[in-house]
């Protein structure tokens, strides 16, 4: 019997890749562990090792093919004693069907989290930031590269800025956000640390007290819990405790929130945690332009800034203005869609879901306004209140847990300051009140997505 | 010296881990396993050698590279594989995944995703043994990278201060993700990391199951006798990338191939079994076949076991109390 070799998934988020190179040719003997091919993903080039032993009988996907879907059959192997010529392409193999799966799940297909982009992204005109001059041109850039560019620009501009964290230099970043910084700035300014978050966060705070401007990368914010004492007790409070003497110009950044099927300890949204703390600024951008302009602002800010990125946005592309020095003010929300019936407030990845929900709602006759908070602390309550005074209804959306969350805070501000304008109680959309489960179906149930936002919006509009 | 049955058991246990991990890698490639998945291939001798010196009631705890530890602790391949696919038949009923499995029955305390966290936890297991006055020991496995976490040293200090019965096994596979030991550690001889806490330590060839066993035996005897904690630094190697998504560009292919062809723990023991006339090619082939059958069955189970019931989302957050 021949054995099918399928296009492997090589990362939690990979759906397709390029078959860069075959390292074995038809007729070659293969033992388990041999490298048979090289595959490129958006993040890296990976080697594919053989699992079974036998003879490489037929290559079905030639090298150089791009967009090869995970699970497509890429080659056939003959087992010991089998004639190569007997190996034929079954219709099943040629059709490159995904592996059989139980009814309710599609782990290979889904991104695993919330909702997928249903084809095209929302097509609405998004009003420009006033900072972008008329006639500016734009370049489509991934969030990953926008963040990288922001760091590079600030490092060129200010010699006191340096980047520190696990795998940021030689490995080029666990998620490739610090790609090529080592090459440009050298190992004095791009520093690989041991796995010792509490230590290097505290070291960063000390360096900031001494006047340097560290950008401390946490491989993910889950690991910043090791360091949270230094972030809160040292970075956030010392200016106050020192009667204004000891400033702490530091940025703590990295991916925050759920990735894809990585389980409870690796999937937390810390927006509300840090948003709670006076002495910190907290930023959580959605698109690449904001990511770039706000990270630059964070690095220049004389205060400790917690900068929450999202792994599942790193590979998404957005237009970034071609400006030499594009910086946005911290603490200003952005109206991403103008509407009159209900206000949807969101930040980070939830903004995309809110925009998608707004499009779907429009088809049902509900005109939603979408506000991207961009900054969690200080919170731009004015933009939110202005919107609610117009729409009279609000849905607060966040990825994390609801209790004591960002949405709770916004709802209470709205109730305190615009009570008379409300035609319905504020609604909250958020993750279920449990640790994030691993199983595909449970993870999906756990995280809020477009449908939940639509449902909540209809509820506050009293439409069923 | 181990007898034939014992030697064949180590061979079988190591091969079981190897085949199980190869299958996990394959299922990951098919999208049936998702998220992070860290394979133990290359390091099998460590856990099999140490486990052979544990007795009923001894506990173990490790990080996220944990499938091998679970199998060595006697957990069923079916339940482990089904957890990897996130199904009801998994040890955590699909709610934990690759990095988070547990078995009270087998005294396996996880399965932890935060680098270094298992070290104080393992020390706490030892504290409980001391508290109850039994003569059990606990084993905390952690990596060369984890050895730089602060909480490791806080635990060392307490363990030594209170003479807790814990064995610290540092699995020095020479890399923490892409960082070679000498790029992260001022003292690269990690068995010396206990010196300032007065914890004795020893370096061990972690690619040789019999050497691992011998050193584990000596250390555990001391620990059980009430002498306090001990550190064994196992010099070992992982053949695969850090996790499935690591292109492993920080080391040369030849480095991996060299270790694989000269120091492989399974091939090493196999060579000895054949050379000393303890076993035959046929006997070992039969073992391999048997193991492949178990592993294939676990893969089938892991695909046919249903996803957890949606109601599981809300269970196990708190105990009724
Ligand atoms: C506190 C914390 N920081 C970072 C990570 C990300 N991370 C996971 S494994 C790993 C490398 C650990 O290496 P090592 O301790 O040598 O164990 P090995 O993977 O080699 O078995 C890193 C940095 C994490 N899980 N937890
Ligand atoms: Mg290691």
Image: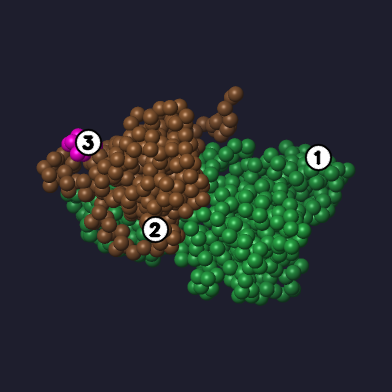
Chain colours: A green, B brown
Number of residue marks = 3
- Does the image show residue A379? yes
The magenta stretch is B1-9
- A421 versus B125 height, above or below: below
| Residue holding disc 2 | B188
Q: Position of residue A113 (x, y in %)?
A: 56, 46
Determine whether the residue tagged by mark 3 lies in a helix, strand or loop.
helix
In the picture as drawn, the residue positioned furthest to the right comes out as: A420
| Residue holding disc 3 | B6
N-term-proximal mark, 2 vs 3: 3
Q: Tell me if residue A295 is in the magenta stretch.
A: no
Q: Which mark is residue A424?
A: 1
Determine whether the residue tagged by mark 2 lies in a helix, strand or loop.
loop
Disc 2 crowd, CA 10 A, few/some/many (<14, 14-19, 20+): some
Disc 3 crowd, CA 10 A, few/some/many (<14, 14-19, 20+): few
Name which residue lies at 47% across and 34% down.
B127
Q: Give the left or right position of residue A187, taking residue A434 as reference.
A: left
- Does the image show residue A296? no
Q: Determine contact: label 2, label 3, CB under 8 Å.
A: no
Determine whether the residue tagged by mark 1 lies in a helix, strand or loop.
loop
């Amino acid at each position: 019997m021949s054995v099918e070799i399928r296009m492997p998934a090589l990362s939690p988020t990979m759906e397709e890749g390029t078959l860069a190179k075959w390292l074995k040719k038809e007729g070659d003997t293969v033992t388990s562990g041999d490298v048979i091919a090289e595959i490129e993903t958006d993040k890296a080039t990976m080697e594919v090792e053989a699992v079974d032993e036998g003879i490489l009988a037929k290559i079905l996907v030639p090298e150089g093919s791009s967009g090869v879907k995970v699970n497509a059959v890429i080659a056939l192997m003959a087992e010991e004693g089998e004639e190569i010529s007997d190996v034929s392409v079954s219709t099943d193999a040629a059709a490159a069907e995904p592996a059989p799966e139980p009814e309710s799940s599609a782990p290979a297909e889904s991104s695993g989290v919330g909702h997928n982009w249903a084809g095209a992204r929302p097509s609405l005109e998004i009003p420009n930031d006033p900072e972008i001059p008329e006639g500016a041109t734009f370049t489509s850039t991934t969030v990953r590269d926008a963040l990288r560019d922001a760091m590079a620009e600030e490092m060129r501009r200010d010699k006191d800025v340096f980047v520190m964290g696990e795998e940021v230099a030689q490995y080029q970043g666990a998620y490739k956000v610090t790609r090529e910084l080592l090459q440009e700035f050298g190992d004095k300014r791009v520093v690989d640390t041991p796995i010792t978050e509490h230590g290097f966060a505290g070291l960063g705070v000390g360096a900031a007290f001494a006047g340097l401007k560290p950008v401390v990368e946490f491989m993910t914010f889950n690991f910043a819990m090791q360091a949270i004492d230094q972030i809160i007790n040292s970075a956030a409070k010392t200016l106050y405790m020192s009667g204004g003497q000891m400033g702490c110009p530091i940025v703590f950044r990295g991916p925050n929130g759920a990735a894809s099927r990585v389980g409870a300890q690796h999937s937390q949204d810390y927006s509300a945690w840090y948003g709670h703390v006076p002495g910190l600024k907290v930023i959580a951008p959605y698109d690449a332009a904001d990511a770039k302009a706000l990270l630059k602002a964070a690095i220049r800010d004389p205060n400790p800034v917690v900068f929450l990125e999202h792994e599942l946005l790193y590979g998404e592309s957005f237009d970034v203005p071609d400006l030499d020095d594009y910086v946005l003010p911290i603490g200003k929300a952005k109206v991403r869609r103008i509407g009159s019936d209900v206000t949807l407030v969101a930040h980070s990845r939830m903004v995309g879901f809110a925009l998608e929900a707004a499009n779907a709602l429009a088809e049902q006759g509900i005109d939603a306004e979408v506000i991207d908070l961009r900054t969690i602390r200080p919170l731009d309550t004015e933009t939110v209140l202005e919107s609610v005074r117009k729409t009279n209804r609000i849905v607060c959306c966040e990825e994390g847990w609801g209790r004591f969350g960002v949405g709770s805070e916004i709802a209470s501000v709205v109730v305190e300051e615009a009570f008379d304008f409300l035609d319905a109680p504020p609604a909250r959309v958020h993750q279920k009140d449990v640790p994030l489960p691993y199983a595909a179906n449970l993870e999906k149930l756990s995280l809020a997505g477009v449908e939940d936002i639509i449902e909540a919006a209809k509820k506050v509009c009293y439409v069923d | 010296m181990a007898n034939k049955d014992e030697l064949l058991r180590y061979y079988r246990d190591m091969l079981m881990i190897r085949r199980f991990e190869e299958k996990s890698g394959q299922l990951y490639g098919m999208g049936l396993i998702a998220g992070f998945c860290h394979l133990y291939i290359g390091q099998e001798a460590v856990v099999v050698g140490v486990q052979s010196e544990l007795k009923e009631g001894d506990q173990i705890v490790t990080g996220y590279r944990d499938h091998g530890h679970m199998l060595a602790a006697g957990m069923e391949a079916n339940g482990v594989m089904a957890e990897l696919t996130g199904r009801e038949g998994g040890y955590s009923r699909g709610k934990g995944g690759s990095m988070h499995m547990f078995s009270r029955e087998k005294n396996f305390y996880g399965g932890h995703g935060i680098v270094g966290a298992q070290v104080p936890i393992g020390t706490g297991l030892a504290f409980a043994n001391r508290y109850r006055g039994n003569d059990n020991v606990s084993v905390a496995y952690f990596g060369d990278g984890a050895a730089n976490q602060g909480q490791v040293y806080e635990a060392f200090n307490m363990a030594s201060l209170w003479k807790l019965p814990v064995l610290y096994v540092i699995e020095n596979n020479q890399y923490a993700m892409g960082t070679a030991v000498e790029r992260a550690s001022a003292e690269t001889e990690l068995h010396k990391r206990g010196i300032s806490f007065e914890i004795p330590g020893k370096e061990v060839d972690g690619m040789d199951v019999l050497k691992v066993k011998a050193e584990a035996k000596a250390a555990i005897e001391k620990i059980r006798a009430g002498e306090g904690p001990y550190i064994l630094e196992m010099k070992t190697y992982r053949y695969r990338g850090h996790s499935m998504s690591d292109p492993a560009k920080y080391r040369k292919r030849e480095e991996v191939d060299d270790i694989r062809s000269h120091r492989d723990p399974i091939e090493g023991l196999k060579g000895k079994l054949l050379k000393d006339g303890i076993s035959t090619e046929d006997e070992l082939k039969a073992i391999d076949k048997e193991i492949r059958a178990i592993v294939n069955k676990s893969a089938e189970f892991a695909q046919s076991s249903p996803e957890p019931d949606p109601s599981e989302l809300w269970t196990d957050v708190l105990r009724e109390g």
